[in-house]
Image (cartoon, helix red, strand yellow):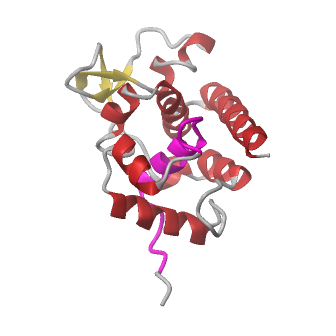
């Protein structure tokens, strides 16, 4: 019996972004789970949802980068909307972190994922998944992709344009290494 697809979950996006990283390409589900601080069964369930949605191949090993780009650019902000919260200490994200912050001036606005080891004060942005700040602190490439995703979730037109280009470059690099 095949599993029913009950919609994408935020951790599905995090897992797909991990698979786009250089280290994530070859990882088994248990290794992805360990790196993202997610249970192996959650990774397995996420990969099945992604297979059904056409975001990975039937073997659940290769990311369909065109479909992922389309989903992240067109749907992420609607499926997982952002409401900036109170000023807290946290880890810089969206327009307050690389690779976006170097390409745009946002004034005194800072956005952070609430995080006990955070280095910046800013408006709280709840991450796609609770373990994101911890996982991102251990993986610079994943962190950059998560920042791009957060910018796609909450950014204005110019910021989103920069994020779309960064996502495109990451997907091209992933595709080039697959061949």
Q: Is residue 6 left or right of residue 121?
A: right
Q: Residue furthest bottom?
A: 1
Task: Report if residue 72 is visible in the image.
Answer: yes
How many numbered dots are placed on residues in this image?
0
Q: Residue placed at 41% from the left, 9% from the top?
A: 108
Say if the magenta span includes residue 63: no
Q: Residue placed at 41% from the left, 41% from the top?
A: 82
Q: Residue placed at 31% from the left, 56% from the top?
A: 39
Which residues are drawn in magenta?
4-25
Quadrant of residue 52 in the image?
A: bottom right
Residue 110: percent from the left, percent from the top? 39, 17
Question: Relative to 118, is 13 above or below?
Answer: below
Residue 177: percent from the left, percent from the top? 73, 39
Residue 165: percent from the left, percent from the top? 71, 30
Q: Residue furthest left?
A: 116
Residue 135 or residue 148, whichever sits in front: 135
């Amino acid at each position: 019996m095949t599993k029913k697809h009950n919609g994408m979950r935020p951790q599905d996006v995090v897992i797909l972004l991990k698979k786009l990283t250089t280290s994530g390409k070859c990882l088994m589900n248990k290794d992805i789970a360990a790196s993202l601080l997610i249970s192996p069964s959650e990774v397995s369930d996420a990969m099945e949802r992604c297979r059904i949605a056409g975001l990975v191949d039937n073997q659940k090993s290769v990311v369909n980068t065109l479909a992922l780009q389309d989903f992240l650019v067109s749907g992420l902000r609607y499926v997982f909307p952002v409401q900036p919260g109170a000023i807290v200490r946290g880890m810089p994200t969206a327009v307050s972190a690389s690779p976006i912050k170097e390409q745009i001036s946002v004034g005194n606005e800072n956005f952070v994922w609430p995080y006990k080891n955070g280095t910046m004060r800013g408006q709280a942005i709840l991450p796609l998944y609770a373990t994101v700040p911890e996982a991102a602190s251990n993986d610079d490439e994943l962190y950059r992709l998560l920042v791009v995703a957060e910018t796609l979730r909450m950014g204005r037109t110019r910021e989103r344009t920069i994020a779309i280009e960064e996502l495109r470059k990451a997907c091209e690099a992933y595709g080039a290494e697959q061949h």
